[in-house]
Amino acid sequence: MHYIPNTDEDIAEMLEVIGVESEEELFSYIPYLLKKSLDLPASLSEVELLRHTMELSERNNNLQKVSSFIGGGSYHHFIPSVVSAVLSRSEFYTSYTPYQPEISQGTLQAIFEFQTYICMLTGMDVCNASMYDGASAAAEAVLMAFRHTGKSRIIASRAVHPHYRQVIETYVGGRGGSFVEIEFELSDGSTSIEALEEAIDDSTACVVIQSPNFFGIIEKIRDFAEVVHKYGALLIVVFTEALAYGLIRPPGEFGADIVGGEGQSLGIPPGFGGPNLGLLGCRLDYLRNLPGRLVGETTDVNGKRAYVLTLTAREQHIRRAKAASNICSNEGLCALAAAVYLSSLGKEGFFNISKINHLKSEYTKRMLLAIPGVRLKFGNSTFNEFVIEIEENPEKLLKQLAERGVIGGISLARYYSELSNSILITVTEMSTLEDIEKLVEGFRKLIQE
């Protein structure tokens, strides 16, 4: 009866009411074998437990111990201290938007600011209060196209993140739709416009491309928009690295109808793969099909500015059977992190961080290409990720690099049989010159051995 705050008098009174003499009699119906103590170690005090968990955590690698060049959807960026300071405040420390939200004006204002930032980032007219992650945002974008066009055929580039394509295919299959993939150009890593022209027809609901794509290549979105719109389909642009839009113009300026992607780069650490932040925006024409919550600005009875949830008839708690989506919550705390991160940097700071990412990536690329046996796989414009090709087994080389304290990238062999000797390398502002030198020297020594 540990941790149950009953006095002896309370216990005696309860036993008398139910008509038993003792606690032993009360529990006498439980078989003896189930009353035996479990064969477990002795319990730990709080200080002992803290020490034990710290010892266990030391077995993990972390980004302070190793030099990491892994990206591919989750990125190591600097997070200003103000982000965690705001997130840790008790009035914000939940991922939920209340069902009587107008009493939480601070929460609604934070979400409204977040929506505004993401509209600026993507070039969309409206963005929602966030999704679970980039993959679910991409899949929900596809379902939006299904609802708007009344069609159920989707075309996706193979240069879209493999995990995103898997999630999209799962969503599409559940709705009875068809899923078609088109190839990328092996010469430069961009999606083949010729392959799209061959695959698209009047039954196509949408086309999904990623920019920068999984190989880091910046796609020519306007060229795709012209082809897609000619067939009455929607162009969906997804992304994994939101920081890229600090340097390149947003997809909305090139004809994208819906934009969905990952916001983890905006103030959220890559902690064992999560939590993440899905970003989803669209043009006003598709607003009624946009899932998730929307915060709008209005005035109260006294004429003062106020925030409300708006267009809630799209949501499952209002019209479950006819809802735009059955996603009934949002990543509110992560959305707040993104809003604080973006506000702390400002436009100039966001541009500068993006520029540092690009410059460090280009420097690393040049250093690696100076090594005999290392080739650039795709000669095209990139942001902070690029693909190299080597003659050695990438998995073996990356394992040897890891033993030297360098996480050297992602072997693309696990996703693309035609890229069996290729490695995706990511460089961010957190990659120091010392880190880059360790990577380059590691490649040089292992290739020459």
Image (cartoon, rainbow, N blue to C red):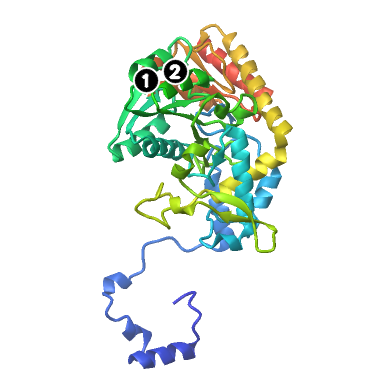
Q: Amino acid at mark 1?
A: Ile
Of mark 1 and mark 2, the one earlier in the sequence is: 1
Residue 303 in the image, given as x and y percentages of width and height: 69, 59
Q: Is residue 385 left or right of residue 80?
A: left
Q: Is residue 442 above or below residue 315?
A: above
Is label 1 in a helix, a strand or a loop? strand
193 versus 75 height, above or below: above
Relative to 441, is 202 on the left or the right? left
Q: Who is closer to the viewer here, 229 or 368?
A: 229
Image point (63%, 40%), residue name? 117
- Residue 374 shows in the view: yes
- Residue at image position (41%, 54%) is 316
Q: Amino acid at mark 2?
A: Thr
Instruction: State the CA–CA distance, disc 1 to disc 2.
Output: 8 Å
Q: Describe the element under mark 2 as helix, strand or loop.
A: loop
The N terminus appears in which quarter of the rendering? bottom left
Residue 102: % across, % down: 59, 61
Relative to 264, say whether 395 is above or below. Answer: above
Camera-side residue of 378 and 56:
378
Q: Is residue 338 visible?
A: no
Residue 63: % across, % down: 59, 35
Residue for badge 2: 191
Using the image, determine if residue 41 lies above or below residue 371. below
> Foreground: 340 or 255?
255
Counting other residues with Cα less than 10 Å from the Cα at mark 2, is it few (<14), some (14-19), or many (20 or more)?
many
Q: Residue furthest top?
A: 372
Which residue is labeled 1 in the image? 182
Q: Is residue 248 left or right of residue 389?
A: right
Q: Are marks 1 and 2 in contact (CB under 8 Å)?
A: yes
Q: Residues within 10 Å of mark 1 (few under 14, many from 20)?
A: many
Residue 340: percent from left, percent from top:
66, 45
- Give the residue at x 45% y 25%: 209
